[in-house]
Image (tube, helix red, strand yellow):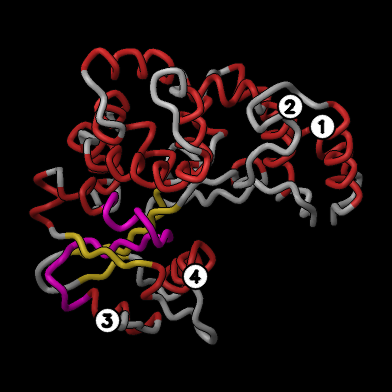
């Protein structure tokens, strides 16, 4: 089925005539639309007001069609500059709302301070799914575990965010620095560690040195060593506050969980990707959205004048 695309002005027109109070733009192509629809409609007042979800794949980013965060932000800037973030109709005020992945934008000063933009707490929606879902229940479902087995698996994996952030601390710091340094190398935030033996094993100082040099040498900023030191200090502050989810992209999480539960349920290496996708979907399916929706109801309430 072909996906309809609208121009920026087209979206403003559609938002005026649709029954929904909130036209919600999401950037991801996998889980974002389902996640945010379930989240928002789980709150009765938001659900009654009406929500229309717009995927990034529906966006025509003039003059070229694209998707993702850049296209969503392009629409935000257009609506802001043309005073279309809030639309006044005969019956009510309607709002354009943009739900974005936080990624690591805070480390490069790219977070937008606007009530119409709402960021994930974790770097992306997939990481939010793991932050909010019932891991014990998901493990039992995906791996067909008995109650005793799921208890054992959960005991091994329940602290996965701390354990992965600790094991990969040096690698994650390099990855987070790669965007503000505008480096062009193999260090990227969604890539698994290249400086730990066998992925999750011991830290390899020689591998770290090689990737650090590549990061610095390909940086397109002045004094990259000093800027790296500043970013490294910011990352250290996140560790000190124990907000480990702020450091982990969602796609990195399920593989590590599968690694942790291997004493209870060993997964063949070639099946890890499929099992990871299944685990994410089951985690999404068992989130208690009612608790999460209260925060977003408060955020959306800021858009209406008091």
Please tell me which of labels 1 and 3 falls first in the chain: 3
Q: Are marks 2 and 1 in contact (CB under 8 Å)?
A: yes
Q: CA distance from mark 2 to mark 3?
A: 48 Å
Kindly identify which residue carries mark 3: 1
Label 4: which secondary element: helix
Residue 300 or residue 90, whichever sits in front: 300
Frontmost of labels 2 and 3 is 3
Frontmost of labels 4 and 3 is 3
Question: Which quarter of the rendered picture does the N terminus lie within?
Answer: bottom left
Label 1: which secondary element: helix
Frontmost of labels 1 and 3 is 3
Q: CA distance from mark 1 to mark 3?
A: 49 Å
Please tell me which of labels 4 and 3 falls first in the chain: 3
Q: Are marks 4 and 2 in contact (CB under 8 Å)?
A: no
Which disc number belongs to residue 233? 2
Q: Residue at x 16, y 65 (%)?
A: 20
Q: Which residues are magenta?
A: 16-36
Q: Residue at x 70, y 50 (%)?
A: 179
Q: CA distance from mark 2 to mark 1?
A: 6 Å
Left or right of residue 286, residue 224 in this image: right
Is-magenta flag for residue 259? no
């Amino acid at each position: 089925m072909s996906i309809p695309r609208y121009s920026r002005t087209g979206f403003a027109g559609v938002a005026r005539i649709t029954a929904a109070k909130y036209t919600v733009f999401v950037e991801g192509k996998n889980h974002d639309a389902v996640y945010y629809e379930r989240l928002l409609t789980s709150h009765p007042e938001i659900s009654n007001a009406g929500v229309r979800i717009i995927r990034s794949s529906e966006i025509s980013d003039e003059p070229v069609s694209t998707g993702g965060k850049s296209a969503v932000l392009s629409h935000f800037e257009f609506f802001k500059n043309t005073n279309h973030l809030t639309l006044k109709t005969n019956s009510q005020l309607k709002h354009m709302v943009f739900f974005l992945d936080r990624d690591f934008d805070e480390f490069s000063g790219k977070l937008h301070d606007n009530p119409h933009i709402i960021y994930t707490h974790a770097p992306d929606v997939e990481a939010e799914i793991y932050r909010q879902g019932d891991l014990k229940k998901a493990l039992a479902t995906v791996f067909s575990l008995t109650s005793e087995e799921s208890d054992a698996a959960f005991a091994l994996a329940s602290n996965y965010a701390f354990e992965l952030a600790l094991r990969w601390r040096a690698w994650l710091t390099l990855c987070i620095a790669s965007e503000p340094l505008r480096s062009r190398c193999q260090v990227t935030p969604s890539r698994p560690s290249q400086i730990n033996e066998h992925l999750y094993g011991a830290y390899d100082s020689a591998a770290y040195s090689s990737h650090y040099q590549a990061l610095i040498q390909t940086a397109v900023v002045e004094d990259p060593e000093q800027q790296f030191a500043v970013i490294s200090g910011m990352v250290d502050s996140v560790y000190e506050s124990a907000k480990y989810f702020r450091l982990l992209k969602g796609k990195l999480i399920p593989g590590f969980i599968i690694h942790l539960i291997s004493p209870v349920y060993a997964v063949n290496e070639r099946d890890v990707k499929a099992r990871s996708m299944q685990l994410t979907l089951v985690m999404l399916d068992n989130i208690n959205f009612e608790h999460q929706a209260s925060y977003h109801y408060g955020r959306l309430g800021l858009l209406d004048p008091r």
